[in-house]
Image: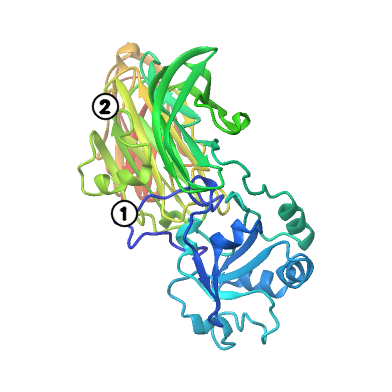
Amino acid sequence: MKKILRGIGAVTALTIATGAHAQLPDYGYYPSGHVITDIDGVSYDVDAILDSGTPIIIDAFADWCGPCWTYHVGGTLETVYETIGDGGSGDVKIFGLEADGAVPESNISNPGTGQGDWTLGGTVGYPLADDDMISGNINLAYYPTLVLVCPDRSTTEVGQVSAAAWGTAVAACPGLSTDDNDPRIIGNATPSQINVCGDGAVSTDIKVVVQNYSTDAISGMYSFEATVGGVVIATADVSLDLAAYEATEVNMGSVALDLGANAVIVKITTPNDDLTNDNITVNVNVVQAYDLGIGDIVVKSEFDGYGSEVGFGLASGEPATDNPFAAYPMFNDGTYPGQIDFQAIGTWTDASSGFSEGYTSLAVGCYHLYMFDNYGDGLTYGAGGSLSIESPNSSETFNIDVDYGSGASFLFEVSTAGTGGFAGIEEVEVIEFAKVFPNPATTQTTVQFVLNETATVSIEVVNALGQVVYTTNLGDVAGVQNVNINAGELAEGIYMINLKVNDNVITKQLSVVK
């Protein structure tokens, strides 16, 4: 196990997940109400510490975690503690939090459990605690996770850096507010890219994150405005009832966007104490979905060494949800709208291989592929990792970014209905008929075709990695042809048979089972 399993009781009961490349609170701002009680029974009110203007460093570790232990015994945070922490100037507060809920508090100081005694014989100056809140507060997905929480509650994953780097990060922390009424826009919650099928028209909700950057709570109506190129495209009156430093999402409603880059400027138009932080540019790129041509497609993937983490679902139409993991249960029980196929997480137990799944006779229209990863690192954690959707009949291939975190959806379209595997027979006038049987095959399969005139013919079999594993050149032939292929010499999997007739290529999928 390369990191913790985030919030899933089993592979059939997934929860909403985010990418694993930055473990941060919702909206990137630390939630209120966290009280840390250390192993000596001393309690620390996180809100009170931050309200005093003091930043907080949190080392979220697990007792059994080797990299956590290595960084801990290296003494970096102890150096920070002795220089700018409570053992020095007091510019920052440091907490080491054992975050695995399955580990008891007693393990922290027990040299016989996990990696050892995290108090290092009582020499660690900063507080150590068994804390069950930190995991949810920062959406923890791996150990160690080291974050800096600034007085304004902005939270940054700093990582296993040097003491000097921690000093620089602490010094750059934003401070507390000095205003009584200062709602500010701190982030964008609108998708940065939207893929669309058809004519490219798209509507999407414009969403931004607003924080109450005030000395006390605010409560009242605030007006928001969204413009593109100086033209107002949306307005909204929103009731904000927020405690100091609390953040929330504001939805401006659905707006129509054009294909290409759209720079949407959202701003608060209600007067308040600081107008300089009241606007943000939301960049949304609307991209025409990739057209794979003929609707006989193959989905291919190579794993990164952790294939057992990966699952996928294929369906017609556009995605039913922006959150891929929310769709997982529907796929799993067969209720997902337009479902064509579903491969559950855990299907592929051979972590070093990949998969190649073929789908034929797709009608003209939109389709989407959901990819799921229950450890939140897509296909990029180890070596290799690739994902593509291709239409061998039209020689079109769409290579998909596999750095998708816990889940992502990929939209594509088909502009010509599938032919059941063979493409363009009507365009190759010399061929009257062609098929591959048996299919699936175990020991042997036959490529049978009929030529109504002499033609130059060759056949090749290509595996899921694009490697030619069989080839034969028939030369100039005519009439009924039966070409036997020894499937017993082929590994189990999906193959493409390319029948080359003069200057034309006809492709058929072959499944080999053992």
In the depicted structure, whether residue 29 falls above or below residue 6 = above
The dot on residue 333 is none
Which image quarter: residue 394? top left
241 to the left or right of 171? left
Which of labels 2 and 1 is toward the front? 2
Q: Residue at x 34, y 17 (%)?
A: 415
Residue 225 location in percent, x, y? 47, 22
Which image quarter: residue 124? bottom right
Query: Disc 1 on helix, strand or loop?
Result: loop
Query: Disc 2 on helix, strand or loop?
Result: loop
Residue behind mark 1: 514
Residue 459 location in percent, x, y? 42, 30
Q: Quadrant of the C terminus?
A: bottom left
Does residue 506 show up?
Answer: no
In the depicted structure, whether residue 448 falls above or below residue 468 = above
Q: Which amino acid type corresponds to the residue marked 2 in the rendered image?
A: Ser
159 to the left or right of 486? right
Residue behind mark 2: 361
* Foreground of the two, 296 or 153: 153
Residue 114 location in percent, x, y? 55, 80
Q: Residue at x 54, y 12 (%)?
A: 230
